[in-house]
Amino acid sequence: MSFSLDLTEEQTELRDWVRGFATDVVRPAGSEWDEREETPWPIIQEAAKIGLYSFESLAQMWADESGLSLPVISEELFWGDAGIAMSIFGTTLAVAGIFASGTPEQLGEWVPQCFGDPADPKLGAFCVTEPDAGSDVSSMRVRARYEQATDEWVLSGQKAWITNGGIADVHVVVASVEPGLKARGQAGFIVPPGTRGLTGGPKIRKLGLRASHTADVFLDDVRVPGSCLLGSKEVLDERLARGREGRKSSGQAALRTFEVSRPTVGAQAIGIARAAYEYALDYAKNRIQFGRPIIENQAIAFALADMRMEIDAARLLIWRAAWMGRSGKPFTAGEGSMSKLKAGEVAVAATEKAVQILGGAGYSRDHPVERWYRDSKIYTIFEGTSEIQRLVVARAISGVHIN
Ligand SMILES: Cc1cc2nc3c(=O)[nH]c(=O)nc-3n(C[C@H](O)[C@H](O)[C@H](O)COP(=O)(O)OP(=O)(O)OC[C@H]3O[C@@H](n4cnc5c(N)ncnc54)[C@H](O)[C@@H]3O)c2cc1C
């Protein structure tokens, strides 16, 4: 097969379908839900009704052997509006958590429950971060204790900053089974819908992604059946034994998930950046100052050229990482982190430039660029901050344990 960056017919159809939804449904509602700071249930329902918010749709995207379908549709949906798109997409992180560590049976049982059905859509949440364990995932305090007599796991502690936290039906919780082993002593657990002891804090008021629900999650002796441990007890016991002997293990629950999801998260950032770039380009062609459109000044035209170049460069890094991830190529230079790092920083820079190109109009809520500027900032923070992504890349390329 010859090298090509063309999307296939199937990928193009998928992209155009999501682009249509983003254009007709998501974009027009962006400002309203940002102001309301509420989960946009009617739009999630609409996405479920057309089959976009569904297990089947995600499975179809996952089946794409090139790995490009997920980043391509993520870019489109977040181009529409990031707060709404995150409300639709937040569940995917929980699904990625199940996918990274769960058995095929667990995938079959829990992933459909994360989505619900078109008449009654549900949400999933992936709970890793804690008040004292953000970038330093290894210092997690939420504990999971096994009770042999009842074959149950008992989870206790507090999670922080959880997308869909407390309003999700299925919570995927990463907890420490053996704190002495730090990250190697952690495992993922399903907390099924309606389990007693799990509660969510109030929705956090944020700079951006305001429609998306973010909250603390409290686990007060939450009991789940032994079968809710992602993977199996045998595999976990083996991993813990390897950890105790100081032998290498196959990876950590939270970090495995992030490897799978980083290029997709980068694609979300690119969606916001592209929205801002297109809007600014259009504005610059129409805004007249000194008797000519402002785009006729190199200062403006070059800014737009840079925006476009950076967006395209970031997308190429994302597509490479997505393809590598899907085809099992090892990220020897931290390519997954590289893609998310570049995309996040491009989104912040591009939206800031867009505000500048619109001048006063860019600073007002009458235009969407101020919202995109606010929304973009999270992409240098969550799923690993820019500093942590640089750490991953630097360690990968040098083999040195850089702090
Ligand atoms: C809107 C939103 C949604 C989120 N959704 C989820 C979710 O669904 N699930 C979930 O588990 N978490 C979620 N998070 C949490 C997010 O992943 C964390 O906020 C992020 O990992 C950073 O952790 P922290 O906020 O504790 O920052 P800290 O780790 O305290 O970092 C503070 C600063 O110190 C820097 N820093 C820390 N360590 C180093 C180092 N070694 N070298 C250099 N610099 C360093 C960081 O880069 C950062 O600039 C969400 C957060 C937000 C804001």
Image: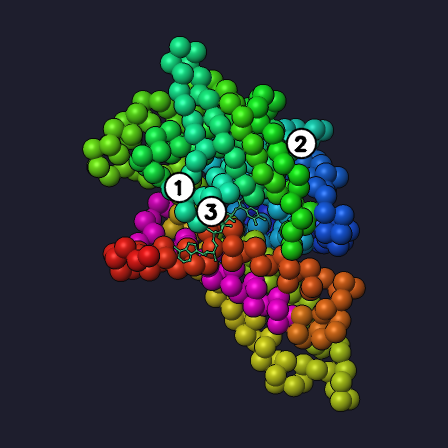
Q: Answer few, some or many: residues within 10 Å of disc 1's Cα (few below 14, many 20 plus, some between 14 and 19).
A: some
Relative to 379, residue 114 above or below: above
Measured Cα–Cα span from mark 2 to mark 1: 34 Å
Residue 140 image offset from top left, x and y in percent = 42, 38
Q: Which residue is mark 2?
A: 121
* Label 3 near ligand 1 (CB < 8 Å): yes
Q: Amino acid at mark 3?
A: Gly
Q: Which residue is mark 3?
A: 134
Asked if disc 2 and disc 1 are in contact, CB closer than 8 Å, the reply is no
Q: Residue at x 51, y 51 (%)?
A: 382
Measured Cα–Cα span from mark 3 to mark 1: 9 Å
Q: Which residue is mark 1?
A: 139
Q: Main secondary structure of the magenta part?
A: helix
Q: Secondary structure at mark 1?
A: helix
Instruction: Name the one closer to the observer, 353 or 63.
Output: 353
Instruction: Name the one closer to the observer, 127 or 20.
Output: 127
If the image is split into quadrants, where does the C terminus sit?
A: bottom left
Residue 164 image offset from top left, x and y in percent = 61, 38
Question: On the rendered structure, is 162 left or right of 257?
Answer: right
Q: Magenta segment range?
A: 326-354
Q: Answer few, some or many: residues within 10 Å of disc 2's Cα (few below 14, many 20 plus, some between 14 and 19).
A: many
Residue 335 image offset from top left, x and y in percent = 38, 56
